[in-house]
Image (spheres, helix red, strand yellow):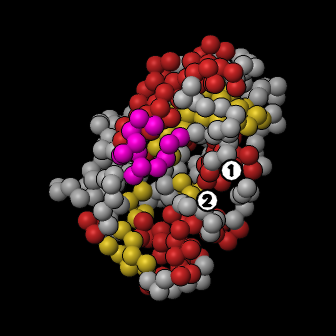
Amino acid sequence: MCSMSATTYIVGAGGQLGTALRASDKASERVRTLTSADIDITEEASVANALADLGARDVILNCAAYTDVDGAESDAGRAFAINRDGPGHLARVSARAGARLVHVSTDYVFAGAAATDDGPRRRVPYEPGDVTGEPETVYGASKLAGERIVFDTDPTATVVRTAWVYTGAPDSSDFVGTMRRLESVRPEVTVVDDQTGSPTYVGDLADGLWELVSTEPGGSTAGVVLHATNAGSVSWYQVARAVFEEVGADPERVRPCTTDEFPRPAPRPAYSVLSGASWSAAGLTPLRDWRAALHDAVTRDRIARG
């Protein structure tokens, strides 16, 4: 286990994942939270100032990111500044201090086959060592560039890829929250049924990251990529039906459509399921099945907001 004197610095503490990390009952005893008001990761001087007290066994847990997948298509400069340059600045600080960097990434780093492409679809979950190829979105390209600069700068860092993260709160902007709101105002909702992934409850992801942080530095989680999502795979349409069921609504009110019928500025992968084998192999507790996690998210809504 990590020394109890170590401090974990949560970068991006005001966001979806940062909020869940702060709320988790598995959080480290010594935590410093850094929101965008405290640190601008795109500016090297700001990073150095905010982390001036970083010690040799401290941890930087970076969950700050530009996550607007469609917006990134027309705002590439900002996406790369946050998703590539920012992690690079953090890695330089962690490497100089001898601290530990845990950087959160995404399934979008894999090129995948867009749902509108012809030909066979991938149906095998991605392992960390699989070739990423060239991501089809600016968002994915910027996050992949961030992974690379992290390892180039601090080879002992850990990158954790996750996917389809949600809180499930009805006032959230994530998919589950959106479905909860739409259920209350529309007789029917149409959702794409040809994109498959692993929905990940942010509370489970936060707990998993705290378990990772608690492991001894320099062990099996140093210098590697890990995948952490709730278990199982499902389409957005199936997630929407499950949300309706959880709130006591008729799932038949959710209608399927294809990606062609719901075009977006950024192409979505037809299949982006991440294998959890690397997480388990590192001695970490596998995240539970996606359906059980969704039930907890919707019925208990245990993530503190504000």
Instruction: Determine the image quadrant of residue 265.
Output: bottom left
Mark count: 2
- Residue 20 visible? The answer is yes
Region of the chain picked out in magenta, as a range: 65-78
Counting from the top left corner in percent of width and height, residue 274 is at: 44, 48
The C terminus: image quadrant: bottom right
Q: Is residue 56 left or right of residue 150?
A: right
How packed is label 1: few (under 14 Cα within 10 Å), some, or many (20 or more)?
many
Which residue matches tag 2? 167
- Give the SS element for disc 2: loop
Is residue 233 inside the magenta stretch? no
SS at mark 1 in the image: helix
- Quadrant where the image shows the N terminus: top right
The dot on residue 20 is: 1
Residue at the top extreme of this rendering: 96
User: The disc labelled 1 sits on which kind of residue?
Assistant: Ala
Q: Amino acid at mark 2?
A: Thr
Q: Is residue 206 above or below residue 178?
A: above
| Residue 227 visible in the current orientation | no
In-front residue for pair 180/42: 42
In reply to whether residue 74 is colored magenta, the answer given is: yes
Asked whether 132 or 14 is in front, the reply is 14
What residue is rendered at 35% in x and 75% in y? 256
Q: Quadrant of residue 75?
A: top left
Determine whether label 1 and label 2 are within 8 Å by CB: yes
